[in-house]
Image (cartoon, grey):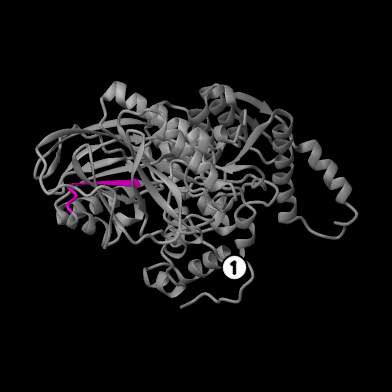
Amino acid sequence: MSVSGNAPSSQSPARKLRVVMAQLDFLVGDIPGNARLVIDATRKAATEHQADIVVFPELCLTGYPPEDLLLRPSLDLRVDEALEELKTAELEPAIVIGAPLRHHGLLYNGAVVIEQGEITGRYFKRFPPNYQVFDEKRYFAEGRDVLTLEICGVPVGITVCEDIWKDGPVEDCAAAGARLILNLNASPYDIDKQARRKALLERKAQENAVSIVYVNLIGGQDELVFDGGSMVYDHSGALMAEAPQFSEGLYPVDFICDHHCQPVSQPLPEEPSLEANVYRALVTGVRDYVNKNGFKSVVLGLSGGIDSAVTLAVAVDALGKDRVRAVMMPFRYTSSMSLEDAEAEANALGVQYDVLSIEPMYDAFMATLAKPFEGTKPDTTEENLQARLRGVLLMSLSNKFGSLVLTTGNKSEMAVGYSTLYGDMAGGFDVLKDVPKTLVFRLARYRNTVSLVIPERVITRPPSAELAPDQKDEDSLPGYDVLDQILNLYVERDFSAEAIVAEGFDATDVARVIRLVDINEYKRRQAPIGVRITERGFGKDRRYPITNGWKSGK
């Protein structure tokens, strides 16, 4: 084990230390802009909070995850220029930032400590993760060294994200004399993530008798959402401070450093409900995807059903009503209830609302197809045509007005292929892509507790695509309460068909659901991205070959 930076002294007098957790939203690839954000935040932390140390998230200079931008030839030059700007910015507090660092020809996920215009320590992440959405070993080498150094007279250890989940880095810092661990993170959100983080930090702090400052990124990046939730634990494993999830800001924490660095306790934020937390994740993901990619507005098809109703509410809460357009595209199978409910939703949220019938277009298409279809019976072809006509209308509005099309499919539908390629799948971002149908219902009820925007009968009536007379989703699928449980076991927990049946599910239902999941991989590969809220979303998390001979069963 080696030690980089200024070695801590064996004894230091008790002193007060103020650490500011910079829970901020950075733009991937905008290295100059991110450096300016670090400078502005540090100056604000100095003037408003009298900060001694400001800690920023993992890879904040590049944003996270930078993916193949890390392979660009000018990466090192841009990072070096940003570090030089930070060194010459005359920042009063010490700062700890995340950046990719090149050393002896290898690239590392690193942390940099800058004090009074000088780099006083560099740390290379020891455990770059390579599972779920993470593929850091594609880019980064594994660090070997420990970084413990005195910052403002206090022995401090530096670690980066995954390092705290493994045995070694925190233990080595504590053994080297650190009384305070600063852990830089870009930890993406999923439903149970904050609880797992808390259990881990409690154990690590207690076992190593050190206080831990855990600073996490916030904001949306493509399908990932980062929830913040930065925290401080004391050496006994007690949670002493916590920044609210999904709230960008600078969060100061005072420490009394003697034999231990004891954080001063703060009131903790109220624990949000699962529905409230997921809803805020969706809002954050939509807001950042639209704004960071420069879209003026969004447009979506409003069917009168629950999925489009929740999507509309999320869009308005993310962007404001003036940037959202809803379009009802009725056909002969569209019920009067759907027409009434869609209009009520649009009016309740105050968005621009259009009603554009697809009937004339459908008749024109069927007339053109009459000869090649001669002698055949109507089937899903005619149903899918309706969805594709709606997709054409939405994409036309998108092209004309620079709006992003939000699709409205949920995870249950995406899993079993209950969607139409180039129809209701046509668009740029799927808000509910990782949200099971049963959770969609819960989100609708949650949103109505904020303000009533979704009619009660939209929540209570049987779901239907309304592509055929008297059609209901459960005519061709198990009930969603059963379907979502089977999907959870198969998609998210990797249970075999036999193992799912052993859990008490009907063998016929299990076989049908698994077959639908397997044969619809080709559709999901062509689907728009959407907000990830589970540990196993479709996309980076679950990478199955389209062409394969694997047989379900054991």
Can residue 282 be seen here? The reply is no
Q: Amino acid at mark 1?
A: Pro
x and y, in percent, of residue 177 in the image: 17, 52
- In the image, farthest residue toward the right: 371
- Residue at position x 42%, y 34% from top? 86
- Residue 127 lies within the magenta run: no
In this rendering, the answer to whether 38 lies above or below 373 is above
Question: Main SS of the magenta segment?
Answer: strand
x and y, in percent, of residue 110 in the image: 40, 50
Chain part drawn in magenta? 177-184
216 or 245, nearer to the observer: 216
- Residue at position x 17%, y 57% from top? 175
Residue 228 placement, left or right of 152: right
The residue that label 1 is drawn on is 545
x and y, in percent, of residue 17 in the image: 19, 34
> From the image, which quarter does the N terminus lie in?
bottom left
